[in-house]
Image (spheres, grey):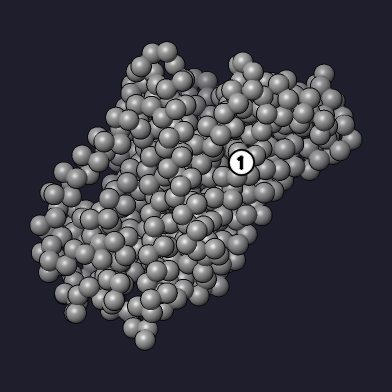
């Protein structure tokens, strides 16, 4: 006999004060925008250069994992919608300590990513105004996204809608031009475009000889994961959607097609238009192609899109961290200050806190860029951790619904539990791949950034988070009446009644 869900007062407390103001077009564009960012517009250049045409397989395979991730998230969202997203699901299925780790890891991811994006905006602006001080650009960019986020969730949705329009528009233009150029086998500079470049590229389709390595397309998958990072934003935005039960399945199911068209389609055309060795790290491959075609004005367009993509990432970072910090605050796992919310349903305190970190971080990045590189790579660990929590929560949800403890979700992940096991196994391989690629990246130990992050960074993070948990544990226990375990056991509720919860401010 399926039981009704107990303990809803504490879980539902996270939703008090939020406005369901995100409509269909916002949801669709948040889903698209989350899957298109600087990882494609800029990061793909270095991957093409080091990997060759087989990068197409890397993007396709990781794209399938990303789709499985979104299906797992979709099952969770239709089980229970929450702006606390992964934090709230970990609290329900694995307990308070798991929620603490998840929330602060996700905050760390966006804090470090946002600092990097803020610094990147300064560099992008110097493309036109080389004398423009980076600190001025940082202040202007932060002021813009902070103002947008403090208005309302709908203002965030509008910003993301138009940012996604700009990103998608640039990709669509490139796809149309690329199809014509490759289809008619026109010259791109001195090189003839065409699908034959897939195998006539130096080293062939899957280069194995120096400077390439046979395992290159496999190792690069750890980097490709971060190109897809932020697609999980739909899970947080679901808490403020007008109709999540209708919109989330549509947005999730469309992800695989968008990845196939925008990512794999773009990589296929880039490989078909120029030898992969022509693409250089730090220069957008789209800028390289249009420059060779004698269309330098398109370089300006791509540069604008890069700024839009970075601002969109900043915008998403403030939006998501504000809501995750409030979820932690309600559970007494973050300062009480983070509970504060405006009359328009904006958790402004958490947003302000993150923006202050962005500001100091951008200054630190300008002063000590080498030290910051390691911190930025640490955000990669947080992304993997977040994706893993989604798969783990889906597995627990399905296990409990199969036992009849809770009702099944209306949007179930196909092939469960094996599809989630595949996702988790892949994420383990990503961490191993980071360590290996980091080790072989430099002969000098302290320049093996990814290796250091995995081998030293993970234990250090674990110690810091454990110390943090021990610091707040007594407060959390007092707040919950000592109920730190998950809401559910295999046979039903872990606790017979719900302790009183503080009314969020």
Q: Is residue 348 left or right of residue 414?
A: left
- Circle count: 1
271 and 36: which one is in front? 271
x then y, percent, for residue 171: 68, 43
Q: Secondary structure at mark 1?
A: helix
Out of 172 and 272, give the one closest to the viewer.
272
Q: Position of residue 213 (x, y in %)?
A: 59, 22
Percent position (x, y) of residue 190? 82, 18
Name the foreground residue: 220 vs 353: 220
Q: Is residue 463 above or below residue 395?
A: above
Quarter of the rendering containing residue 191: top right
Q: Count neighbours of disc 1 (C-alpha within 10 A) and say few if under 14, some if 14 to 19, many if 20 or more.
A: many
- Please report the residue visible at 44 percent of the width from the left and 16 percent of the height from the top: 442
Q: Is residue 484 above or below residue 372?
A: below
- Whether residue 470 is visible here, answered yes or no, is yes
- Residue with the most extreme right position: 184
Residue 495 appears left or right of 117: left
Residue 23 can be seen, yes or no: no
Query: What residue is pinned by disc 1?
Result: 59
Residue positioned 60% across, 45% down in the render: 61
Quarter of the image for residue 51 reads top right
Q: Residue at x 49, y 40 (%)?
A: 226
Identify the image quadrant of the C terminus: bottom left
Measured from the top left, where is residue 1 in percent x and y?
Answer: 37, 86
């Amino acid at each position: 006999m399926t039981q009704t869900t107990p303990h809803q007062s504490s879980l539902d407390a996270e939703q008090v004060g939020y406005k369901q103001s995100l409509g269909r077009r916002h949801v669709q564009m948040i889903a698209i925008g989350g899957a298109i960012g600087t990882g494609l517009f800029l990061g793909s250049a270095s991957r093409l250069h080091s990997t060759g045409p087989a990068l197409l397989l890397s993007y396709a395979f990781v794209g399938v994992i990303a789709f499985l991730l979104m299906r797992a998230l979709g099952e969770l969202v239709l089980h229970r919608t929450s702006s606390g997203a992964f934090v709230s699901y970990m609290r329900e299925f694995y307990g308070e300590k798991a929620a603490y780790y998840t929330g602060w890891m996700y905050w760390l991811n966006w804090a470090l990513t946002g600092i990097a994006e803020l610094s990147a905006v300064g560099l992008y602006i110097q493309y036109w105004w080389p004398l423009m001080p980076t600190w001025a650009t940082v202040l202007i960019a932060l002021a813009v996204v902070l103002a947008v986020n403090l208005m309302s969730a709908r203002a965030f949705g509008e910003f993301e809608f138009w940012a996604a329009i700009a990103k998608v528009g640039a990709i669509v233009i490139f796809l149309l031009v690329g199809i014509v150029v490759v289809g008619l086998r026109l010259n791109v500079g001195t090189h003839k475009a065409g699908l034959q470049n897939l195998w006539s590229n130096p080293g062939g389709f899957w280069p194995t000889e120096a400077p390439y390595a046979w395992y290159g397309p496999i190792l690069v998958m750890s980097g490709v994961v971060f190109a897809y990072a932020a697609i999980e934003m739909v899970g947080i935005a679901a808490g403020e959607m007008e109709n999540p039960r209708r919109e989330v399945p549509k947005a999730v199911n469309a992800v695989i097609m968008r990845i196939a068209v925008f990512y794999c389609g773009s990589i296929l055309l880039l490989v078909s238009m120029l030898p992969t060795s022509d693409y250089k790290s730090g220069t957008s491959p789209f800028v390289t192609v249009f420059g060779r075609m004698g269309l330098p004005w398109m370089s300006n367009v791509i540069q604008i899109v890069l700024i839009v993509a970075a601002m969109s990432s900043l915008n998403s970072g403030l939006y998501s961290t504000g809501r995750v910090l409030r979820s932690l605050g309600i559970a007494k796992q973050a300062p009480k200050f983070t509970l504060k919310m405006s009359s328009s349903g904006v958790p402004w305190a958490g947003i302000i806190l993150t923006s202050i970190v962005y500001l100091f971080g951008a200054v630190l990045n300008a002063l000590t860029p080498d030290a910051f590189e390691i911190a930025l790579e640490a955000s990669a660990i947080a992304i993997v951790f977040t994706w893993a929590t989604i798969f783990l929560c889906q597995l627990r949800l399905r296990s409990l619904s199969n036992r009849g403890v809770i009702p099944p979700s209306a949007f179930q992940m196909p092939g469960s539990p094996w599809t989630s096991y595949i996702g988790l196994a892949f994420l383990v391989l990503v961490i191993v791949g980071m360590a290996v690629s980091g080790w072989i990246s430099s002969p000098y130990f302290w320049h093996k950034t990814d290796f250091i992050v995995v081998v030293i960074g993970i234990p250090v993070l674990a110690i810091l988070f454990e110390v943090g948990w021990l610091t707040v544990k007594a407060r959390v226990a007092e707040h919950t009446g000592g109920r730190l375990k998950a809401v559910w056991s295999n046979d039903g509720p872990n606790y017979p009644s719900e302790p009183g919860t503080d009314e969020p401010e």
